[in-house]
Amino acid sequence: MQLLLRSFFQEVEKNALGEIITCKMHDLMHDLACSIANNECVHGLKGNDIDKRTRHFFLEGGSHENQLMGHLSKAKYLRTFFRQDHYGVYSQWKNFKEVIFCNIFQLRAWHSQLIGGIEDVESLEFFGKLKHLRYLRIKNCTVIGTDLPDCIMKLYNLETFIFQSGGLKSLPNNLGNLINLKHLDLSDNLNLGFLPNSITELCKLEALILQNCHNLKGLPKEIKNCNNLRRLDLCNNWSIEFIPDSITQLINLETLILSWCRKLKELPEDTKNLVKLKHLDLQGCNDLTHMPKGLGELTNLQTMNTFVLGKNKGSELKELDGLTKLRGELSIRHLAFCSSIVDQQMKGKFLQQKSDLQVLDLNWEKHLIVDDELEDVIYESVLDCLQPHSNLRKIYINGYGGVKLCNWVSSKFLGCLVTVRLYHCERLRHLPRFDQFPNLKRLSLEVLPNIEYIIVNNNDSVSSSTNFPSMKELEISNMPKLVSWCKGTTLAKSPIIIFPCLSSLTINGRCPLHMLKFWHAPNLKSLKISDSEDELNVVPLKNYENLTSLCLFNLSELEYLPECWQHCMTSLRFLCLGRCKNLKSLPEWIDNFTSLDRLDIFSCENLTLLPEGIQHIRNLQRLRIECCPVLEERCKENIGEDWHKIAHIPKLDISPRFH
């Protein structure tokens, strides 16, 4: 960190937890470091660079065993060996080991990627002789064996051990011999079923990483003995249902990652005892039934992406009030269980002071609601107590059952919003004035069956235009009662809706396409229309001069592409037609699409031939036809009746199945 602050490093990248994962060194600083180090650090095989002064060696790519062994024989005091071999074989592994033993037994760090020539895990036994080794990483080792060699347990100085192979089923029972181990990473060992109890003897262990160990059933009950553990990562473990209660005695634990543990039912009851916990990742834990009581006492918690309300058990919303340092993303699930919350609790503004919270995802989950006629006041009260800080940038609301949203969902309170998604809000009748959010870039309105207008002017006056200055992506889906964009307008008299930055538009289901006539979107590049019963000739493609992608899905009324599109799509590069069961033919003027380089057609059973014009589209690079039986027959190589029309296309993908 000090080197970063002193500008030795730059272009830092951080993960979701705020941890630095990569950085770069300026070329001048790198050259200076190399000049000072001279032959102490060597990157690659460069003539006679390697000698007895070399301490650190890095080799990336290629198979250079003969040359490599010759050079390494000179490196009597090598401390670091880093090989990232993209070609994957040590064809002379036996000779290579002898060089290691005879010349560089003082090695402190070993990193090996893709050791493809090792036939079994016994070939790793030579590591047991590297008594001074402190760092050992072996990744993608294609071993046949299922157990680690016992000799590795003799590396008493080892501090970091990373073994990611996929074949490992068990660990030695004497794992506790690695008394100086601080970092243990066994990720991607899909068959690893359990950890030996001796792992609890690693009293210096600070990080235990077990990502993608799909068969791991759990942790030893005595894991509490690893009292220096600061990071525990069980991401994407499919078999874990419960975490041992003893984990709550890890008083130094700062990071607990349980994301995508799909069978996880609950957290330990005394999770509140993890007073130093800063990061709790529960993303994708969809079977989680509730949060344990007392989470509000974890005052150091900075990230907690999921908070699950239980039915008459576990934490309540008021626990969020104590988590003053929360930042990043927060998804609150099972809000339907708030129907029984007492009025006194509803008065709290549990999120309003959390200025670093950027993303808020509120979920009512309709299937959890027993009483379909919950009063609007309950929905509005729950939503009202969840007012975020004005710095919020993204909000998602799912399953909300009220008729209207509360007052804080407006530009007055949320002027920084860039993304809004409302979906499955089936009783909602009133929307906020989205045109008053100056920074709004992405708007998604899905399954809002009672919405008639997107914008309602309260003063009954209709402006000549409505501007969405920052909007880039817009999705409107399954809004069958939608009449028009603005209330009080008719087809003859409607304001121009201005989208100067709109690049992607998706319209799905029963939504009126005629409103597109009044949209000014000069920079639209992608248009997707699906499940619509409207005539496509109302879509004014002539207004979208920069359109490059057009996708039409499941349009049961579509028989032909509209004639009015004939001269409108000279910039189109990608055209996709899918599940248009009544589509009879493509137009002969398809060669007007002079920029088209990809055409996808699937599940259009009544499309029986290709137009002659397709052979004149010289930019067409790829044609994909799937689940179109007649067309597939006509496009068979060399013998199909339409083969001459498509023979010039470099990449053809014609299949009876949809990939």
Image: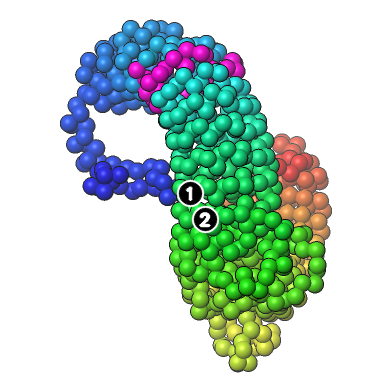
Amino acid under label 1?
Val
Q: Do the residues labelled 1 and 2 touch (CB within 8 Å)?
A: yes
The residue under the point 65% across, 37% down is: 240
The residue under the point 38% across, 17% down is: 64
Q: Horizontal placement of 496 versus 313: left or right?
A: left
* Label 1 to label 2: alpha-carbon separation: 7 Å
Counting from the top left corner in percent of width and height, residue 453 is at: 68, 79
- Residue behind mark 2: 297
Is residue 300 in view? yes
Query: Which of these two is toward me, 378 or 66?
Result: 378
23 shown above or below 612: above
Which quadrant of the rendered structure holds the N terminus? top left
Counting from the top left corner in percent of width and height, residue 330 is at: 55, 58
Q: Magenta segment range?
A: 132-159
Q: Magenta stretch: dominant SS?
A: loop
The residue under the point 47% across, 17% down is: 153
- Residue behind mark 1: 275
The residue under the point 38% across, 14% down is: 130
Counting from the top left corner in percent of width and height, residue 61 is at: 41, 25
140 is within the stretch colored magenta:
yes
SS under mark 2: helix
